[in-house]
Image (cartoon, rainbow, N blue to C red):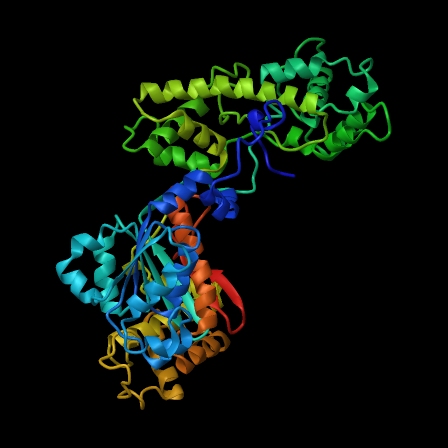
Amino acid sequence: MNDSQPIETATTSIQMSSGAPDAKTRRYDRQLRLWAASGQAALESARILVIPATATTTSILKNLVLPGLGHFTLMDDKVVTGADAGNNFFLDGFKSIGKFRAQEVVNGLMEMNDGVEGVADVRNIREALEIDKGWLKTFDIVVAHNVDSVILDDLAALLWPDTHLVVVNSAGFLADFSIHYREHQVIESHVETSPSLRIDQAFPALLEYAMSLPLDTMDITDHAHIPYPVILVRALEEWRREREQVSGPSSGKGVPRTTAERKVFKERIRAMMRKFDEENFEEAEAQAFKCWTPTVIPSEVRELFNLHPSSASSSTTFSGLVSGLSQFSQNNPASPQYPSGLLPLTPSLPDMKSSTEEYVKLQKLFRAQSEKEKQVFKEYLSRAQVDVNDATIDQFLKNSHAIKVLKGREWKEINPGAKELLAGKLSTHTKEAATHLALAAIRKLRAKSVISSLEYVSSPNDTAMTDILDKDKLKDLLTAEAKSFLPPAVELPEAEWLVASGEVARAPSADLPTTAAFLGGLVAQEVIKMITKQYIPISAGNAASSTNDQLGICVVDLVETWTGIL
């Protein structure tokens, strides 16, 4: 078990439930385990605009309505055709034909969760862009699927950077999507990396406790339940004293570095056992690497200190918190032996071989030290006049080892992308780049009126482009368009381009139910990450990083069944 828990929820203050959970808690029980009450509150207050009412956007909305999205508006001025009735399960079959798609889809979606507000807007997006620009910017996120390229350019320019734009493109079994934002801050990234226990830089109370235990004379049962962090701190301090040839406290520096030294150190831990089957000592031996793994500030967090320097004024709560963290890492008076180079200690522990009594005793030590360091951190915030509540501080400190600031790109930067960057991606991410180029090419051909747009044709039965839709001819057009996106000397990869262009030419405007369902889950997941500011959405990299070689596009290929990131 890798989960950690604060002392209040460990064993010392177990309380019986005062009653059965309410209806909302029962309904959202599983997702509350993923993003907690704070994430659910953010989701329930979010406003999303979706354009238009395709099978894909309906599937995206389904996966947002079920977990309790606050409000969505579905904008589409088209009426339901026979093709729509055949590929969108939220339409009422033949009964929906001739009615507005947006209204019919909203009616179906609202049956799934009566706590969500859904609105059908039967205007054309062009009209809203002309006369209702302010209204478009009231949404938190706008999702656009296979929208005409010219309209998409205007929409993206209007929304940047205040409103996040999610662009989804699909053709048959191929698709890609991207999220457009300037900067996205994540405190609860839920990474698998656990915060450091500071075995190599033990705080005074932990070191004193570890050295005070009478290991040779204590009760054998108690000996078999000493938590492994205590064992490791004791073993490392004894090793340091022998190395420095002192009888009192060591300098707190030095760790086993060579393979031979580490082997001898593990033998030292085994020699501390008083019975052959003491699992806590076996666990300590397995975790011995924590003694020589230095406790350092992760490089991504250190980069953020340059992005939000402690000397700069704090324009936002997040920048104020990062600035305070930077100051703490430079001077932590609550840890006199190791005053710099550390993040605040978290009051949580992983599961380990131990008795309840010993586990709680260790957790109290960590909690007390964590509280001291929290007060130091709050003092830095106070000096900078950063006004933030204790709950936010606790959340930030708990996740300080894994905070993220991600950067995105404007739509125009990846439509389809810089020529040299695309050329590089063709050599490093050949399949993903070929698929992206094929989808970008069909989008450009629609914009040039070479092929009818899926959503913006003059009639549902428009067959004027039948000759152009010849598969071989369309593949040639796609190839020519894709080559125009690349430097003159760069060639398209033959095998990968054959698959990508072939599928796009086969179904340039097909919104297949299988692709729609798969995309619906992927896109909704990323939207929820953006809304809750939890977990890590697709991005163009870390905001503090100087590298600029990521496009931030998720590519989907259900012909060969893979997904990838450009």
Q: Is residue 134 left or right of residue 31?
A: left
Q: Nearer the viewer, residue 543 or 94?
A: 94
Q: Pick the residue in front: 75 or 204.
A: 75
Residue, far front: 19
Which image quarter is the N terminus in?
top right
Snapshot quadrant of residue 218: top right
Viewer-nearest residue: 100 or 131 = 100
Residue 443 image point, x, y percent: 31, 72
> Is residue 519 rendered to the left or right of residue 459?
right
- Residue shown at the point (29%, 22%) measured from the top left: 385
Task: Return the x and y of residue 104 as percentages of the image width and height.
Answer: 32, 68
Up-down relation of residue 516 to residue 506 (above or below): above
Image position of 357 with respect to 419: above or below: above
- Which residue extends farthest left? 131
Residue 505's x, y, as percent?
Answer: 40, 81
Q: Is residue 543 visible?
A: no
Using the rendered image of the protein, determine whether residue 288 is visible from the camera's viewpoint.
yes
